[in-house]
Amino acid sequence: MAIVILGNHSAVFAARSEQNRIRNFYSDVLGCKTRMQNDEVDRFQLDDFHFCFVYQSAAQDESHFLKAIYLELQTDNVEEMKQKILAFGVKRVDVPDPHLYFQAPGGQVFKLVGIDEDLSRYEESPSSRPGASASAS
């Protein structure tokens, strides 16, 4: 059987009008290393993960990203990073979870968690939790 893993590169098609906000957010707020910047494409690196933004005149409306995959950002200081992210003016996303979910410039949605935070409760199936009853599929 073939082995499949998630890679460490992403690409987002974004509105050209968001280019400056995207650059400021990923460089100044998240501290990404800028790998390339031009009128058409920006590439940023955060640890070993790479973000590529391809700018277009007509890109998908940011509201559509709210129905797409959410990525997880880890930090060693959740409160400090949360304040920095919110001060930038991102859109908060209402999710029934205690973590900060937000929509970054360009549309991508992130969940902010602590690096050493125990997230194993998100990995359990509902039937394996104490007090949960198994249901037939």
Image (cartoon, rainbow, N blue to C red):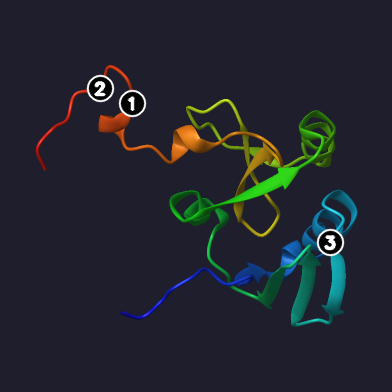
Place of residue 14 in the rendered image (x, y in percent of width and height, measured from the top left)? 64, 68
Instruction: Give the labeled residue for mark 3.
Output: 32
- Residue that mark 2 sits on: 132
Mark pair 3, 1: CA separation:
38 Å
| CB within 8 Å, label 1 to label 2 | yes
Decide: is 64 above or below 98. below
Q: What is the crowding at mark 3: few (fewer than 14 residues within 10 Å), some, or many (at least 20)?
A: many
- In this view of the protein, which residue sits in the foreground, 84 or 129? 129
Three-letter amino acid code of the residue under disc 1: Arg
- Name the residue rendered at 71%, 54% in the picture: 105
The x and y percentages for residue 61 are: 54, 59
Q: CA distance from mark 1 to mark 2?
A: 6 Å
Mark 1 lies on a secondary structure that is loop
Percent position of residue 11, x then y: 61, 73
Residue 103 image position (x, y, % from top left): 63, 47
User: In the image, is residue 20 above or below residue 35?
Assistant: above
Image quadrant containing the N terminus: bottom left
Q: Mark 1 sits on what residue?
A: 129
